[in-house]
Every structure is written in C-alpha cells, then in structure tokens.
Image (cartoon, rainbow, N blue to C red):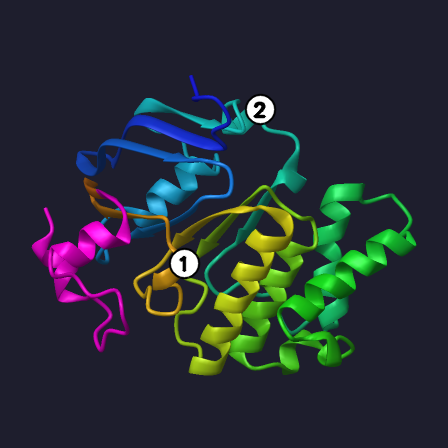
Amino acid sequence: MSGPGELLRAQALSFGYGAEPILRDVDLSIDPKEFVALVGPNGSGKSTLLKILLGLLKPDSGSVELFGVEPSRFRERWRLGYVPQRPSLGRELPATVQEVVSMGRLSRVGWRARQRPADRREIEHALDSVALFELRSRPINELSVGQQQRAFIARAFASSPELLVLDEPIAGVDTESQQRFRDSLAHLRREHGSAVLLVSHELGAVAEDLDRVIVLKGAVVFDGSPKELVAQGVSLGIHGEDLPLWLERLG
C-alpha cells in the first residue's frame, strides 16, 4: 500500500525480457511537491521502469500504485503529466503550438467540453511559462527541437498535474532551452505545487532544485539527496560525455 499522500510507489519490482533480467527488486516513491531525478547509464533499465510505473508494462513481480491505485485502474489522467522523449505529432499534422498545448487542457476538462475563458487563461499561462506565447500561432513542426520540447512541456502544464513525468526532456537541446526548461519547472512547482520525476542523463540545468536523486543500474544503487552525492565526490554539473563516469562508480 502507498504511504499517506504518496503520488507514486513501486515496491520490489522485477522484470526481464525472457531470461534476461532488466530490473531487480526496485523500490521507488514520489511524495507531493517532490522533485526527484532518476538517472543511470544506457541499459540500466530506466525506460523499462518508466513504462512499468505508467502502466505500459506489467512487472514480473512486485507492485505499483499511481495515486493509490494500480496504473491499469487509474482514470484521473489530468493528475498525471507525461512528456516522452522527443515527442512528435508528425509533419502530416501541422498543428499550431497553441493547439498542441490545448490538448493538455482537454485531458482535464474532457474532450467534448467547450473551451471556457478559464481554460484559455490556463493555456496562455502554460505558453507564457515556457516563453512560447509569441510563437503560439506557429506550426509546431517549424520550431526548433528545444522549442518543440518546451511546447510539449506546456501541454503537460496546461492540465496543472499533481505529478509531472519527464523522459530525457533536454537531450540534445541548446543551453538557452535548458535554462527555459529549468525556469518552467520552477514555475510549475511554485504556482501549482506539482511533483516532478525527471528521467535524465544530464542534471546540470536542475541540480540546485532537486530533492532526491535515484541511481538505477538494474537495481537502485543510490537514493538520497544531491548533497549526499556531492559528499561522495560526485558532480551534478554539465558533463561532456553521455555517460558520466560517476554513474559507473556507484554500485
């Protein structure tokens, strides 16, 4: 069972593809308003764990509760914001930035509901929070990679989620977009009290804002505060390699 107020809890999760084990006895929890980073080298099981947490895969053993229920029984989708790695609508659907962000609001009010003034204000607020209001009428496929990613983050913001899950949101984007990303998360947490689970190799843009860091290498090899990592000689700044050496040393 989830603890009081927990938004997400996984206990003793194990999973494998055939005879190949991917995850071993993984425990993870996210509390309200908490900012948690999940990191690990390629092949560590991050993507598989994320799919299990979101109900896209079933574990071989263990349990997951999302807002107190199994992911398959979770219905209040507006409470969860999710931004996958490099999301895309495809060039055959030339939606504007505002139309993409509006989709997030519809997840909260219902797909058949007419847009009210309050909904329009929330959509504009989400656009402004990621500095895309001036580009709201542009087709999203004309934007840079960093701008597109910010648009999808705004789409998640528009529903004012209690938990925002981000999968490698700043991979390959420029420094300005990384700073905009950090500012957007700070806004979401300050204005809406949202919790954040960030799956990433790179923590430099948000290192000062994190409450906890979880390092996954098939199993959880570290779960604690950034200060504890720094005390072990770990740098959470910008790394020149996709796989920071400190990830290899832990565990």
Q: Which residues are magenta?
A: 223-251
Label 1, label 2: how many angstroms apart (C-alpha)? 32 Å
Q: If the image is split into quadrants, where does the N terminus sit?
A: top left
- The label number, if any, that marks residue 122 in the structure image: none
- Name the residue located 47 percent from the left edge and 54 percent from the top edge: 166
Q: Secondary structure at mark 2?
A: helix
Mark 1 or mark 2, earlier in chain = 2
Who's the residue at 51% across and 37% down the image? 32
Give the mark count.
Answer: 2
Where 135 falls versus 117 (above or below)?
Answer: below
Residue 89 visible in the snapshot: no
Left or right, 77 with respect to 124, comes to: left
Q: Residues within 10 Å of mark 2 (few under 14, many from 20)?
A: few
Residue on which disc 1 sits = 209
User: Which mark is in front, 1 or 2?
Assistant: 1
Q: Is residue 186 above or below residue 26?
A: below
Q: Which residue is mark 2?
A: 73
Residue type, mark 1 in image: Asp
Q: Residue 180 placed where, x, y %?
A: 53, 73
Q: Is 232 included in the stretch rendered in magenta?
A: yes
Using the image as rendered, state which of residue 127 and residue 212 is in the foreground. Answer: 212
Pointer 1: residues within 10 angstroms few (<14), some, or many (20+)?
some
Residue 135 seen: yes
